[in-house]
Image (cartoon, rainbow, N blue to C red):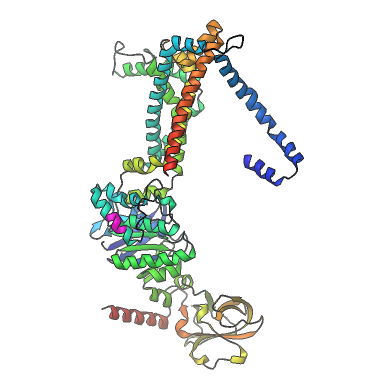
Amino acid sequence: MAHLHIQNLQAGYGKKLILDKINLTVEQGEMIALLGPSGCGKTTLLNALCGFVPVSGGEIFAGSRSVSQLPAEKRNITMVFQSYALWPHMTVAQNIGYGLKVQKAKRAEINRRVSELLSIVKLEGLEDEKVTALSGGQRQRVALARALAIRPDVLVLDEPLSNLDAKVRLSVRHEIKALQKQLGFTSLIVTHDQEEALVMADRIAVLNQGKIEQIGTPEEIYHHPSTPFVADFMGAENHIKWPTHDDAFRLNTSNPAAELDLYFRSENAVLATPQAASKDDLNAGLIIHGHVEQSVFFGNNYQISVRCGKHTIQADHDQNLSENTPVTLSVPNNALHAFDKEGKLVAHQKNHAVSVKSMRMNHVC
Amino acid sequence: MCWLLEVNMRQTTSPNLLKHRLWLIVPAALMVGIFFLYPLGFSLYSAITLDDGGFTLSHLNKAFDLYSKDILFTIIIVLVSVAILAVLSITIAALITLSPFRSLTKTLGFLYRLPLFIPFIVTAQMMRTFLAKNGLMNNAFVASGLLTPMDTVSFLGWSGIIITFVWKQLAFSTLLISGAMAALDESQIRAARNLGASRLSILFQIILPQITSTLGVAMVLSIVTMMSVLSVPLMIGTGSPTMMTADMAFRINSYGDYHVANALGLVSYCICAGLAWFYLRQNLKEKGAN
């Protein structure tokens, strides 16, 4: 395994440019998740890495080797496909050993490697089964073993869990992560599921319209989104344009006239009814007064939709509330993501993000 | 249509309604019965009976005595044609599926379909003027200085028949095979490529094993078509040996001998059935293995 370095990468289909000046380095043994909505270019990036989409500009290095102009078969970057892409006319062992057979490895060497991989992915005893007889989770493990068999420089995974049902997905997710730690392969995983990215990746790159919006550790991306898009995509679904010109909203800021985009998560909005009025409003960055519009049971809590003028704010609460109950929402300063008109993080948030980042780096050192 | 009928029948509980709906299939059943089953049955009957209706094998004996060379010639011509056909149509379909040159494959994808729309008799006439000693092909060679008029050879005969069959059937079998190749999941091919497989390995190890049943269908259908063509051996063949269809036409036109013509028909039917049985057996074996 080697590190992967992508430099000013441009790629697309025909004349349409999908990826524009992508710069990304995946360290040896690191797993980076490419996270973004459908059509943001994350699968195109994987296809460009593997040589399935021509690169129109920039360079891709696997270790010290430039691979951007090499054909797919010479790149030594293997992919685990969303649809598994196993060959149904071959057995499990034939699927896993195919890459080695192509490299003209000796039969004994192929058998040894196949047994080794079968035990790694916990499929011992299934080598002679047809892949069509396996379950979804088992097929995905065969696909993973097949991609690892030739000891690729980089492993890329294209939404590897999206075809699995919810329960299997959780177990395969942990298995892939555990394998990645055990074998230390350099990998890029594409997903549109935030939770999957947070759990599996060492770092996350959020993509939007063919560009990387932010790259950082899961904690950085989650707690300190650097753009409105990342904030929104990472679950800060409440959005308020400040100033609201509405007395129901109060923002504790030194410059109340500043035009801001405020984002926060429903879990960070502390909801209080008039009976249990909050006394620590002073610590809150944003205070909102409104009325309950709807209350939906979410298992461990209720998600309350609060109507405040033209805004509807989502907040989590441990009790069900009846419609039109007057409530007060307070969002602490550190849970509030504020961006200026240009979409830049406002100063106090930025400083906070930097301080956390530097703390992490010191910790690593 | 069939499943719709089946669903409708399942929903129906009244026998009257069921009887009523059975009438729906009568027109189709009549067409098959009158235009296919009756002539086929009559032909088989005529091949093994005398004029007075008594059973006999004399027509079959006569057919083998007079035309065993032609039967062998027919089998060889058809098998050689189908072998060449398989190689060429797999090559074209593979080029269309695997070639990185998109504009080339688009042109090829358009060109290979043209013979689909040309009838056998027109193809035979075209090939006659193309393959003859003083035909278009030899004239082009002479004009380009590659051959002198003395060196030219006529391709009319067994080679001409094979060329014509292959040319005409190529479109049909390539259409089926490239359709089967296109239906394979693109990521299966990509998976092989990023494990280091060349395009040729992908064709033989990944694609072909998965399309053998379509290849079989294309070849069996092509064999049946070639066995039944009259115009090509008549117009391109040299007369002796010739294909069985020409012999059948000769028995009827020259002697009004329907019995021996039908006996030859029975033989050609058995050859087709034998090949189809061989194909089905192979196919079932593979399915059993799966």
* Residue in view at x 39 percent, y 20 percent: B76
Residue A342 is situated, as x and y percent measured from the top left of the image, at 45, 73
Specify the segment rendered in magenta: A113-117
Instruction: Find out whether residue B174 is within the magenta segment.
Output: no
Q: Position of residue B63 (x, y in %)?
A: 48, 12
Question: Is B175 displayed left or right of A308 in the figure?
Answer: left
Left/right placement of residue A219 relative to residue B23 reads left
Find the residue positioned furthest to the top. Answer: B255
Front in this rendered view, residue B128 or A94: A94
Front-most of residues A333 and B44: B44
Q: Percent position (x, y) of residue B30?
A: 67, 27
Residue B112 visible, this angle: no
Q: Main secondary structure of the magenta part?
A: helix
Residue placed furthest toward the bottom: A279
Q: Is residue B90 above or below residue A363?
A: above
Quadrant position of residue B161: top left
